[in-house]
Amino acid sequence: MTAVADDGRLDRLREALTGTLPGTLGIRLDEAGDGVLRASMPLAARVMAPNGYVHAGALVTLADTACGIGCWLALPEDGPGFTTVELKSNFIGAARGELVRCTARRAHGGRTTEVWDAVVEDADGRPVALFRCTQLILGPGR
């Protein structure tokens, strides 16, 4: 994967996670480039449901964060913002190990929308969740 141009945006976004929901869950932005973003999240008590399994909401947050940061990095640095307008998830397994990894890929990059697909895998590389989200690119006055 070709890394994002070294303009410091990925590092600034890593810092910006502090004090936010993704930061509280321990989400890390591992690498980005060419319409792909990889992130990970440790499976600590803060992301678990009372039944002892990782909470579906934590997995959705990981995938939405990876897709959103990927979308953000695809925008011009001084460009408009974006917002998630649709997110679909399919849970297909239970996470095992000490962390989960997410790979988000841009499926469509348009003028007003981007569509991103993400796969969340357990530490052994087994898929546990599939996601698709649509990002609305915000222009002036939106």
Image: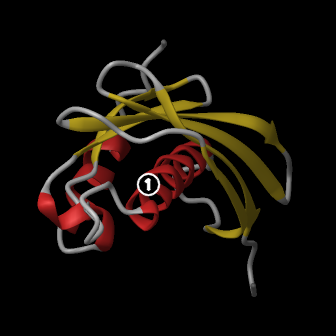
Find residue 93 and report its horizontal and vertical position in percent.
Answer: 50, 39
Please give left or right for residue 127 compared with residue 49 in the image.
right
- Residue sitting nearer the eye, 3 or 51: 51
Q: Is 55 situated above or below 11?
A: below
Q: Is 142 situated above or below 114?
A: below
Give the residue displayed 50% in from the left and 50% down from the top.
63
Mark 1 neighbour class, 10 Å CA radius: few under 14, some 14 to 19, many 20 or more: many
Residue type at mark 1: give it.
Leu
The coloring applied to the image is secondary structure
What is the number of callouts on the image?
Answer: 1
Please give left or right for residue 105 compared with residue 112 in the image.
left
Give the residue displayed 36% in from the left and 39% down from the top.
95
- Residue sitting nearer the eye, 39 or 7: 39
The C terminus, quarter of image: bottom right
Q: Can the viewer see residue 120 in this picture?
A: yes
Q: Is 50 situated above or below 31?
A: below
Outermost residue to the top: 1
Q: Which of the 4 image quadrants contains residue 122?
A: top left
- Which residue in the protein does label 1 denote? 59
Q: Is 72 situated above or below 94?
A: below
Q: Which of the 4 image quadrants contains residue 40?
A: top left
